[in-house]
Image: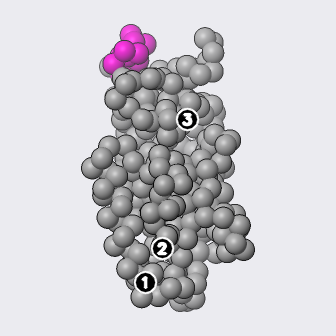
Amino acid sequence: MNLPLSRRCHLVSLGCPKNQVDAEVMLGVLAQAGYRPCQEAADADLILVNTCGFIQAAVEESIEAILELAQIKNRRPEVRLVVTGCLVQRYQEELVRELPEVDLFVGPDGVGRLAAFLAEEENGRGRLHLPAQPYLMDARTPRLLATPSHRAYLKVTEGCNHRCSYCLIPAIRGPLRSRPVADLTAEANRLEQAGCQECTLVAQDLTAYGTDLGRSGPRLSDLLAALVRETNLPWIRMLYLHPARVDDALLDLVAEEPR
């Protein structure tokens, strides 16, 4: 059955795998609101650009993508153009002023409320949404995978507490928030049931996992041990580890566990 054009969305996601997970959450939220993704932007009534704003090259790529997709809106003014992600959080009102063709801007902490923000914009309640409450997805969060069915990303934290002089992530993504081990194993099991064979853990810094939960909180080695114990995923991979916190417990587990 062909859906009406007004219920089709097209999403372009730029940047890192963590941003891709945000894009998958937005697709899940939109699916619950009745939208279905389509391959061609020209076929959509709702076009989204999930941006990266970390380095200048990423900023330029994001702006180019927005302007290219805005050409569709120029030809079909009824199309709604939405910009999300780190570029919005970094430039905020400046972006709103410079891109009048964009209908809605949503920062990273607003991905879970995208459908509500769309409804508000439709009713004339504002173009820029930067929620003050830091966002952290959980296993119940709707998510429509954009990766091949055999692999998926598992985002274990949001934000970062490091204050590296070269990095904007704490200013863009906020402080470190770690998801509970039980919540992550629940999502990993759901991914496995959906056919995932290769699960890649992602975060701003995986080795910081749990450090925001106190001295007795879980650490990355505890999370990995739980995933090994409570799932049958053949491959568990790690992406983005700061060497300062790579400890013996982590090294021993990786050495002993073939998965």
Q: Position of residue 143 (x, y in %)?
A: 56, 57
Q: CA distance from mark 2 to mark 3?
A: 28 Å
Q: Cβ–Cβ below 8 Å for labels 1 and 2? A: yes
User: What is the secondary structure assignment of the residue under circle 1?
Assistant: helix
Which one is closest to the eye, mark 2 or mark 3? 2
Q: Position of residue 200 (x, y in %)?
A: 40, 41
Task: Determine whether 249 is above or below 66 in the image.
Answer: above
User: What is the secondary structure assignment of the residue under circle 3?
Assistant: loop
Q: Give the magenta part as a residue range.
A: 243-254
Specify which label sits upstream in the sequence, 2 or 3: 2
Count of marks placed on residues: 3
**Quarter the N terminus occupies:** bottom right
Labelled disc at residue 4: none
Specify which label sits upstream in the sequence, 1 or 2: 1
Q: Amino acid at mark 3?
A: Gly
Q: Which residue is mark 1?
A: 74
Q: Amino acid at mark 1?
A: Asn
Please tell me which residue is depicted at 34% across the width and 73% down the height of the picture: 68
Which one is closest to the eye, mark 1 or mark 3? 1
Q: Which residue is mark 3?
A: 174
Q: Cβ–Cβ below 8 Å for labels 1 and 3? A: no
Please say whether residue 174 is one of the residues in the magenta stretch. no
Q: Which residue is mark 2?
A: 101
Please tell me which residue is depicted at 37% across the width and 79% down the height of the picture: 71
The local crowd at label 2, few if under 14, some if 14 to 19, many if 20 or more residues have their Cα within 10 Å, is some
**Quarter the C terminus occupies:** top left
